[in-house]
Image: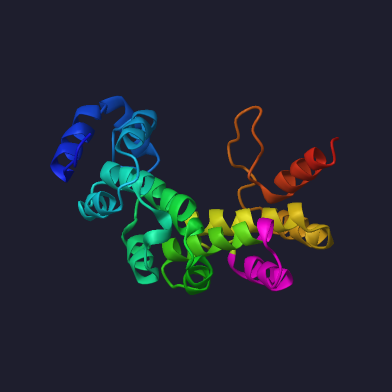
Amino acid sequence: MGETTVAEVMAELAALEDPRAREVNERHGDDHGVNLGKLRELAKRLKTRQELARELWATDDTAARLLALLICRPKAFERDELDAMLRQARTPKVHDWLVNYVVKKNPHVEDLRLAWFADPDPLVASAGWALTTERVAKKPEGLDLAGLLDLIEAQLKSAPDRLQWAMNHCLAQIGIDHAEHRARAIAIGERLEVLKDYPTPPNCTSPFAPIWITEMVRRQNGA
């Protein structure tokens, strides 16, 4: 492909629109109808194009933004640019891909984690918690794990859905990876009962923290 324009990419995305895919996505809060496998194929063909990614993001179209996150250069974004992008990312998939595919690979990740963690906007705060969970698992040095458990204990039950989900993941991760906090993490989960009745398909692990922690530890121990 030569220098592809935004208009050309938008036309291609429109051609990939599938009403059935849109119906499924909308049930999860995502307003687009592009099959993600086909979106990834398009991204592979376009390769890395930072300026095109910025232009696609500016369209405010969900499929275009998902594509932008696949063809951007994560390290090329400035801190304030990523902060603005996160505040614009209101659909779950865009929010999730921005945090996981871009922010986690950006040199400003720790600064953003701290800024977002205590943000009054629950969607922004959920990104801060997601980045904290990543650190709990991969780089816990310097984190106050007992303090995190205090916050979770006080706020998890009343947190809005997506923030609650992110905090619950952090609770489980602390229990899975840090044996010295495991009993307390399980006890918090049992007392708060958050996601206890979440419908879990067969062969999937429940997101209810006590079950999640116990199951993952059992696997790690080769049981």
Viewer-closest of 73 and 115: 73
In the image, residue 147 lies in the stretch drawn in magenta: yes
In the image, residue 116 lies in the stretch drawn in magenta: no
Q: Position of residue 131 (x, y in %)?
A: 55, 61
Residue at 28% x, 41% y is: 63
Task: Please tell me in which quadrant of the rendered image residue 87 appears.
Answer: bottom left
| Residue segment shown in magenta | 136-155
Q: Is residue 56 above or below residue 123?
A: above
Judged left or right of residue 46, residue 179 is: right
Quadrant containing the N terminus in the rendered view: top left
Viewer-closest of 36 and 71: 71
Residue at 43% x, 48% y is: 97
Q: Is residue 120 above or below residue 26?
A: below
Viewer-closest of 126 and 160: 126
Q: Position of residue 221 (x, y in %)?
A: 85, 41
Residue at 30% x, 32% y is: 34
Q: Where is residue 119 in the image (x, y as percent from the top left)?
A: 45, 72
Quadrant containing the C terminus in the rendered view: top right
| Residue 93 in view of the camera | yes
Q: Where is residue 22 in the image (x, y as percent from the top left)?
A: 30, 32
